[in-house]
Structure formats: C-alpha cells, structure tokens
Amino acid sequence: MNAIQVSIRLVDGGMQEFTCGHELLHKLHSLQSQGLAGKQLIHRLITDDWGAPPVLVEIKDIGLNGESLAIRIPYT
C-alpha cells in the first residue's frame, strides 16, 4: 500500500510535507461525516498548534489501480 502524501501551505509562504498511512483517510472521512470542514477539520485531523497557520492542506494518494486522489482543504 502506498503512503499518503500531505502538503500544508502556510500563510508565511512556507510549506510542510509529510507522509502517513491510510488511517488518515479513514479519520478524514469520519470527521467529514460529523460535519467538520475547513479550520475545524484540519485542527482535528492534523493539529491546532501552528506557528504560521496554514492556508491549504492537500492530501494525495495513488491507488493500487493507478487512480489518483487529491483532496484540498482550505483553512477557512
């Protein structure tokens, strides 16, 4: 199984990137089903302890069948 790629664009122009397991997608879908979006969703999914806050979180994955997944969550 491929790792999930997470890119976080920060308000100061910086960027944070990391990889994680597919449990992040399960948590994402669970939080979205609870009605969370934007800032609240990012806080619960990743963290609420930012130096420079994010502008956008992007989650990317390429499945075993070659299909790509790209989820963009604005920090609003």
Image (tube, helix red, strand yellow):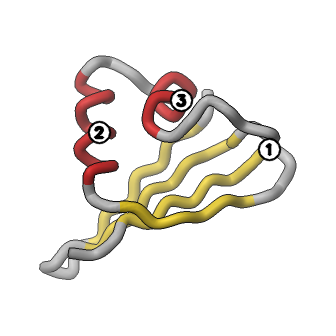
Is the C terminus in the top left, top right, bottom left or bottom right quadrant? top right
Label 1 or label 3, whichever lies nearer to me, is 3
| Between discs 1 and 3, the one toward the N terminus | 1
Q: CA distance from mark 1 to mark 3?
A: 16 Å
For disc 1, the marked residue is: 11
How many residues crowd mark 2 within 10 Å: few (<14), some (14–19), many (20+)?
few
Label 1 or label 2, whichever lies nearer to me, is 2
Residue, far right: 12
Residue displayed at 62% across by 53% down: 8
For disc 2, the marked residue is: 27
Location of residue 27 (image quadrant): top left
Amino acid under label 2? Lys
Residue displayed at 23% across by 44% down: 26
Amino acid under label 3? His
Residue 15 on image: x %, y %: 72, 60
Count all numbered tags in the image, as a single digit: 3
Location of residue 74 (image quadrant): top right
